[in-house]
Amino acid sequence: MKKIIYYELRRMLLNKTFFGMLLVNGLFAWFTLSYDIIMGTAYTAPFSLWSYCVYLGRTLPLAMITVLLLLANYYYSRKQKQVEILTSATPVSSFCQIMIRTLAAGICFLLIYLVVIVLALLFYVSFFRFHDFAAFVLPSVVLLLPCFVLFTSLGQLLGSIHRSLVYVLMLLAFALHSITGAFDFFGAGYFSTVPLTLPIGTDGEPAFEISAAFLITRLLYVVLGIICIYLATLLSARKSQKA
Amino acid sequence: MKLFSFYRVELRRLLLSRTVAAAAVLSMLSLPLGNILYDFSSSRAMSARYILTPVVMTGTPIGAILWAAVMIMEADRLQRSGVHILTDTVAPPALLSAARTLALLTISAIVTALTSLVYLPSTAAKMSYLFSAGFYFANFAVFMLPTWWISILFADAFYQITRRVELSVVLFIALAGVSVSGISSFNYFMRWFNPYVITYSDGFPSVWPLRIGLYTRLIWLCIAAGVWLVSILCVRKYQKGLFFSFWKNRKKLAVLTPAVLSAATGIFLWHFQPFIDHGPHDYKYIDNLLMEIDDANRISAIQYSLSLNPALGTISAKAAYDIQVPYRGEDVLQLNPGYQITKMTYDGENVPFRTVDNDINGKRSTYFELPKDLYNKTLVIEYSGFPTQGRCWANSMVQDTIDHDYISLSSTAIVPRLDNYYSARGSAVIDITIPDNLMPFLDYTLMTDFADNGDGTKTWRAACSEIVRDFTAGYYTINTFQIGSLNVDFAYGTAYQGIVEENDIEQTIIDILTYGSEHYGELWSAEQNHLLLRQESSMFGGGYALHGVSTWFETVLSPDTLSDMDKGASATEVFIHEMLHQWWGGLGLECAQEDLWSSEGLTVYSTYRLVKEKYGALYAQQYYVDAWAEAVDNQNRSFYNRHPEYLELLPKVYQSQIASANRSINHYQRMPLMILKAEELVGGEDKMDEILRRMYEHQDEFRENGFGFADFLQYCGLTEEDIDGKCASPHNDSAGSASF
Ligand SMILES: [Zn+2]
């Protein structure tokens, strides 16, 4: 089991595609910070929670595309098919297999966001002498986690149906990067429009709050993600039985 | 042919290579980057935005880097894999290397063709009626492909000579660095890698940039090919060093002849380039008005006859002077340095002359001496050639150019200048033969008298003075109308006819001129009841006014400008804005560029007043006053306005980025709102108009330093506090951008 996890991680992380995409993610993040976030979102400070959430939202589509690109490898290469025959010979249930993949994808995602968030903190400290990051934790989790769960599970479900559907999902991530309202997967649209509708506080900025509707849809995304994982497990279990 | 069969194998291999595919895709995708990354402050012609920036300024250099990288990687590939020990015995390495380079050159040509096809539909759609397929493809063929080839040849040559990836990369970067460095910023010839084109024009297309572009590409292709041919001799044999290989390859020394020939051709072309003269980089003011002309040295009549050949961009001309008394001693005439005097006779006898390469301000002197006792004879000067641009204004690219679609010539590029004679005004007649579809202006006056030669050319005739300052011909449409006693010739590019008709521009011009002269005073350029309003090629970089002529920037009528909501709520209103700059700005009352104040404030306010008169108070309130107030409100709410201390913390680049965003709102919205407030305080619209009229009357006082905000307050008798002159950006950085 440990060996398989180790193998999967090496396969996913130690390749040119991942490092290249990590670099592209970092560059894009810095570009977003220095051209967009620096102006502040909806008249709030660049280091307000609103602006920070918009920043996460803007960087999310590319990060999700990166994760999907790495996942797509599984359903693509012939080599993997051979490995699958090998791994399916070892007694690992298809659920475990999917969980291992999700774990590997999760580590990719974490590494990307490590870079993206560290860049933001560096930006805030060096440009604005701003250090108060405690409040950033919760919104980050609310924003990142559902998005990751939904996309990786949906990606695996679609991938196990047909590998080209993963690419369709990538296109979808591109297309949906700027919807507004509570259903906004990535949050950039939501967090840049909502503060305009809120009353302005004493410091000239609306206080940060996340509406219940937004939280509930986030929760729904997580549930939807779990359902997708379940379906994917069923599907691959049936496939391996056939084999 | 061994080389050919190797070439075919390599071509097939490279076509399937992933590196090549990646380079092809990336160089194709790079084209739109330019319009995102470069920051263009003023409005630009559509062809500059949709052809120049993506193709020439972005795709060409980025592709050049990518192809050089592929070339070095491919050249190194065999070496790395160790296969060369095997292949060397089968195929001569030099031949194989040459085949590989040729294959990559072919592939880059295919990619150029594909790129041009991929972007064809979207470019054609965006530019709509301003699109010309020939011009579009020419940019790929002239700039992109040759530059990529030069890059590939250099990259391969560097690798073959050094046999080290990192060394060849360093050499390539150094060579590219020369091209992008400050030394070569305005030097067409040094920029092998990032060709220089100032901008393009939509209505008055000039091929001069393509001419010099092709010429400079040719220079560098020759040089690169020479270096590359030499590098073939350095291809290593049997794992030996550079000198041994060179020695072993000596049988191929035959290659050296074309190599040297090719490089020498490049250097020769560079040295004898016909585009830019040898004058100084800056315009030199010469005080030659003190020269005393003998009253006797009179010219009684001059006959100029010019024939322009747009295909070659050349002129062939004759100037005949009836001289009453020849100048005593050595005489001098000035002519464009690109022209050669082919013949000079006085009374039918040849006159010896010598031309001296002492170019200054786009002129070159020729010395001659006339027989001093021969009175009342005719001096005939025949000259021809391709006009050079004076180095001091070379980056405008169209100062002196003879193109199929656009002709622009200045002073000595038209006729010689004889400083030692004087002539009575109007004693000269000029005949100019040009393509029959171009509309000519001589000294900013529309030419009207012509004879059709029936061969696609027309010969235009006009009386002129001894010195001709300007000749311009292009696809112009002229609308002539009268406003009171003022005769207006409204000349605009025929390409813009649709826009002019759609937006009822002619009536708008009448409205503007009527409104402006009623409220602020007659345009000073309207002289003797005649005014020529001429659209000028955007390559000149600005409009200007003379007596009887007012020119305006081409992009005033461009779709991009007319949709700028800062300037007016509709295209017609933007046009009103741009035309009101004839009063407020460089053509009328010169305004200082300050954080709050610029010519835009007065122009936007005047536009609002005119629109109010034209469309009613309700309309003007909604689209002007309310819109200004909203923008100002938003600016007041913005973070840096509430906390200027954070702006100070930012690095300089970001400060100016934010300051320039602020400045635009200050100029276009905050200032007009403040002028409106001032209007209220001084006692209403009529009172304000009176003040504006006085300001415009005193324009001469502000020619040098510009009319500033303090001057405005003084004219109104108000203080800054009265009209709340709170400035959104306390930063005064010098990067003020001119906007039209
Ligand atoms: Zn303006």
Image (spheres, rainbow, N blue to C red):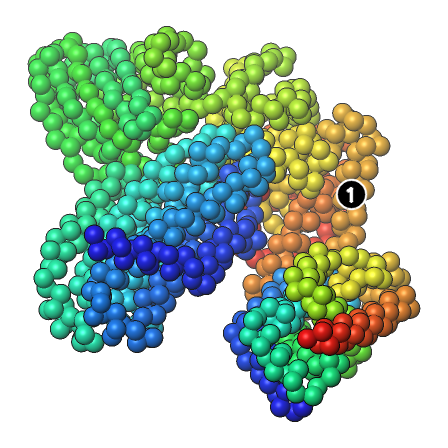
Disc 1 within 8 angstroms of ligand 1 (CB): no
Nearer the observer, B457 or B600: B457
Q: Amino acid at mark 1?
A: Ala
Quadrant location, the C terminus of chain B: top right
Graded by Cα atoms within 10 Å as few (under 14), some (14 to 19) or many (20 or more), the crowding at tag 1 reads some
Residue A131 drawn above or below residue B692: below
Q: Residue at x 25, y 66 (%)?
A: B160
Residue corresponding to mark 1:
B627
Q: Residue at x 52, y 19 (%)?
A: B477
Q: Residue at x 32, y 66 (%)?
A: B75
Mark 1 falls within which chain? B
Residue B237 figure quarter: bottom left
Residue A85 drawn above or below residue B116: below
Nearer the observer, A17 or B128: A17
Residue B384 figure quarter: top left
Residue A32 drawn above or below residue A112: above
Residue B129 drawn above or below residue B6: above
Q: Residue furthest bottom?
A: A2
Q: Position of residue A9 (x, y in %)?
A: 61, 83
- Residue B735 placement, left or right of B474: right
Q: Residue at x 25, y 38 (%)?
A: B274
Residue A185 figure quarter: bottom right
Q: Position of residue B208 (x, y in %)?
A: 36, 36
Q: Position of residue B655 (x, y in %)?
A: 61, 62
Local SS, label 1: helix
Q: Is residue B656 visible?
A: yes
Q: Position of residue B272 (x, y in %)?
A: 21, 42
Q: Residue furthest right?
A: A212
